[in-house]
Amino acid sequence: MTPQPPIWQQNFAEACNWNQPLEICTIPELLAPALTQRRDAPALDFRERKITYREFGTLIDQAAVSLRATGIGPGDTVALYLPNTPYHPISFFAVLRTGAKIVHLSALDAHRELIHKLKTSKARALITTDLVGFLPPALSLLDEGAVQQVLVGEDARWGEGEAARVPIPARDDVKRLFGRADAGEGEPWPVPAPGDVALLQFTGGTTGTPKAAMLTHANLTAAVSMYRLWTDGAPLEPGCQKVIAVLPLFHIFALTTVLLRNLKDGNEIFLRQRFDVETLITDIAVKRATSFSGVPTMWLALLNRPGVGQVDFSSLRACVSGGAPLPFDVQTRLARLLGARLNNGWGMTETGPAGSRVPNRAEPRPGLIGIPLPGIDMRIVALDDPSHALPPGEIGEIAIRGPNVFKGYLDNESATQMAFRDGYFLTGDIGHMDEQGLFDIVDRRKNMIISSGYNVYPVAIESAIYEHPAVEEVIVIGIPDAYRGQTAKAFVRLKQHAQPFTLDELQDFLRDRLGRHEMPRALEFRPSLPRSAAGKLLAKVLVDEEREKANSAASAQPQAPLH
């Protein structure tokens, strides 16, 4: 007897090519067709320069040769410490060509967070560029022994940019990325297997302790295939799309859904180093971009730009918001502005980040994350017994399984075992599924803050604040922020006889301890902090207080009309 398809597949048969198998391969194999079939088509548009797929392939070859000349090969890990620049995709594919794996570093990371990531991943080399915000910190990491060598891509190769550059020092452990063009010429390249780890992507999980999620070639290419099989509405013809890539490529959302997916399709990517609403409008209204994926802060900036109602958005065929929840009323206003529905869904670093999408036929509602992408199975499990699947309508933890789900946490077997039950990854997100198979999230992971699309963990901020000599106790929670979505607020109880300090003074103290995205934006002193009967500090009490304040403030203000 043929098994029944999942309930969501029965009710939304038109949303996907449900019966087509996933294309699971290695990352080099994913790129290969475009390099041969789209040679003279533009792959990247950066600073008004077009890089064709032919040139892109040549640059990858040259970078891979240069990496191999430094001894990089199978078993090694290479850190990418880069902004959005052609050096990122070039280095990403070049490192994997050598058989090594990648770990992403963020420019937002504090120095000690960079040290932790390099130490945990055992990165041997670091690739960066000679911009002032990148090369000096990279050299500091080198001097401290966090890596053995630094390879530098010269920013001037791509034309004039706005950021300042610094000289590349002449030393044996600092090399130019394209320094050798003949090393190992003629030698065969390693052939990775789909099950080999390609990427170590750090995620704090539910505890705030940074862990390296091991994502294989198969995980990433499966996720790309899942997104490509989502055909709800008019399918996006491969090779005909112009895609804006302003989200940071070191983030899993942009890496998979923007970069890898569109290179697989042979599309043109408008690679932008920083977000600027006027550049975004030019890319859409003048250059006729067909696709834009952004985080809520970007969509809000566009929505609030004076005169935005006169912009021609007719070229857009795919508009996606991800990285953080977008307020429901903002989704509605954007749909009116764009003349098209804003696509959203759900995913995680550990899922590469494929998870769910909202079908066009589903009635929008707050908290809706849609149905699983093809190849994925999701269910709701009991909070007290993850082996027990719950029926539609009951609230529990979202669990997921599929070929996109990560291999485990690097060198952390206990955390890996705790994260899985019966083959399903336990996401830590609380939600429910309705009778149609549509999933909703009712609460985010415990205590986690999502600010401008980045996961921010209160325990990391609290640990840094506890280093302040005047602090006796601290609780950090997320509060609503009109621009960032959420931001961190610190509640502090001072030590006896200690003097209060200002928010600016606290931020100065934390500058070398936290990344910019983690910095508290609000501070409140209290004579005491809420505790449980057992003496445990209770963040939930403060969360409820702030939510009530926000609700009261919102109800007291009239709704601004959309012009």
Image (cartoon, rainbow, N blue to C red):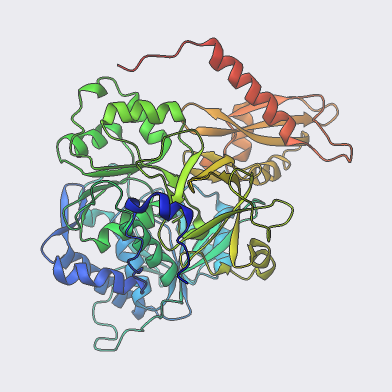
Instruction: Tell me: residue 51, above or below residue 490.
Output: below
Residue 415 picture quarter: bottom right
Instruction: Tell me: residue 82, above or below residue 103.
Output: above
Residue extending farthest to the left is 40
Q: Position of residue 144 (x, y in %)?
A: 56, 63
Residue extending farthest to the front is 1
Instruction: Identify which residue, 79 or 546, lies in the foreground.
Output: 546
Q: Specify the quadrant that holds the C terminus.
A: top left
Instruction: Tell me: residue 24, above or below residue 292.
Output: below
Residue extending farthest to the bottom is 187
Q: Position of residue 27 (x, y in %)?
A: 35, 70
**How many tags in the picture?**
0
Instruction: Tell me: residue 344, above or below residue 240.
Output: above
Left/right placement of residue 40 relative to residue 551 reads: left
Left/right placement of residue 120 relative to residue 281 reads: right
Left/right placement of residue 497 relative to residue 22 reads: right
The residue drawn where x is 27% and y is 76% is: 180
Residue 421 picture quarter: bottom right
Q: Position of residue 205 (x, y in %)?
A: 61, 54
